[in-house]
Amino acid sequence: MNAIYYTQYGAADVLHYGEQPTPTPQADQILVRVRASSVNPVDWKIRSGSLKLLTGQNFPKIPGRDVAGEVAAVGSSVTRCKAGDRVYGMAEGIGGANAEYALLDERTFAFIPEKLDFAAAAAVPLGALTALQALYHHGQQLSGDRVLINGASGGVGTFAVQIAKALGAGEITGVCGPDNAELVRSLGADRILNHHEYDFTRDLSRYDLIFDAVGKSSYLAARPALRRNGRYVTTAPEPKDALTGTFAAVFSDKKMSVFLAANRGMDLALISAWLQAGTLRPIIAHTFPLAETAAAHRLSEEGRAAGKIVLLVE
């Protein structure tokens, strides 16, 4: 199969397009003929080597977590689907999705909602799972809560604004650049803060829940903006901020949660229902052919894309 792969850590130039072995499904896996995938910040953070203590030195590596395509083969114990079914989900481990074929676990994949094409479906899994788990599982959002989403126009943030609304937020504040204000408002934000001009931490005791979707703030900086029993959730803090914040939260009624998205099939099923009902819609910033994944990585690293960067696989 053709795939994007790299044999050493480094800048986007280390990414190659060429032949790699086609994976073989285990008993509880499905092999998917990938029609679209995507680029998430974690992909280029792994590629750059900044997470190599976790990702190790085994090469070659195929990047990507988001998979959307058709079932090509099923493992011996798989009963949920058959060849030709349209499915999507998040690949296990640290990658494997930016290729013509990829594996999904039977317990975690979902069927693509009828109204979504492959490109739209590929924009969903990691971003939407992160947003749902941040707000619901870790942030314990309640109906009527005042919620702030930092990075509201990004691949995770655009889902977070919509999911906060679906969960019954009383007020949603989206932090983004001025060029993306109307997009964020159209997704359900009640207030827009231009991060170039306003620091949300000045909003003393305003928010029940702050979700930093881009890791640009910290618990200690954001804590004054939280109301009593408020929650601060993030997925990508600086290591020092994570350590000091976790310690400080122990002695405060304002809590902090740091997490990585879990590959939960029940969560993706809920997301699929919202997508089919029109409650949730993926926002695609740009599309690239799979062979141009290096360019897609560079765009993602600039941090200015509104929505998801999708890779189309021929």
Image (cartoon, rainbow, N blue to C red):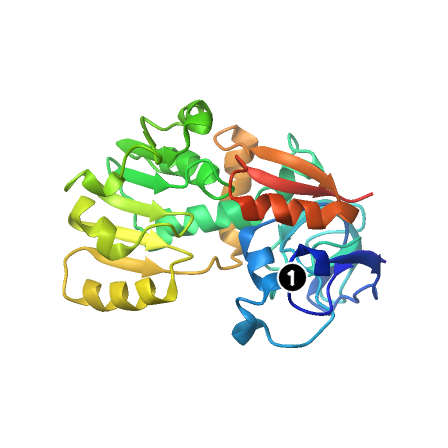
Label 1 sits on residue: 95
Q: Is residue 164 visible?
A: yes
Expressed as whole percent of the image width and height from the top left, the position of residue 178 reads: 41, 27
Along the horizontal axis of the image, is 156 left or right of 298? Answer: left
Along the horizontal axis of the image, is 298 left or right of 181? Answer: right
At 65% across and 61% down in the image, what residue appears? 95
Expressed as whole percent of the image width and height from the top left, the position of residue 237 reads: 38, 58
Expressed as whole percent of the image width and height from the top left, the position of residue 177 reads: 41, 32
Along the horizontal axis of the image, is 208 left or right of 28? Answer: left
> In which quadrant of the rendered image does the N terminus lie?
bottom right
Expressed as whole percent of the image width and height from the top left, the position of residue 234 reads: 37, 54
Mark 1: amino acid? Gly
At 58% across and 72% down in the image, what residue appears? 55
At 71% across and 61% down in the image, what residue appears? 14
> In which quadrant of the rendered image does the C terminus lie?
top right
Residue placed most toward the observer, 141 or 270: 141
Q: Quadrant of residue 247?
A: bottom left
Q: Is residue 187 visible?
A: no
Residue placed most toward the observer, 302 or 272: 302
Q: Is residue 91 above or below residue 198?
A: below
At 63% across and 49% down in the image, what residue appears? 297
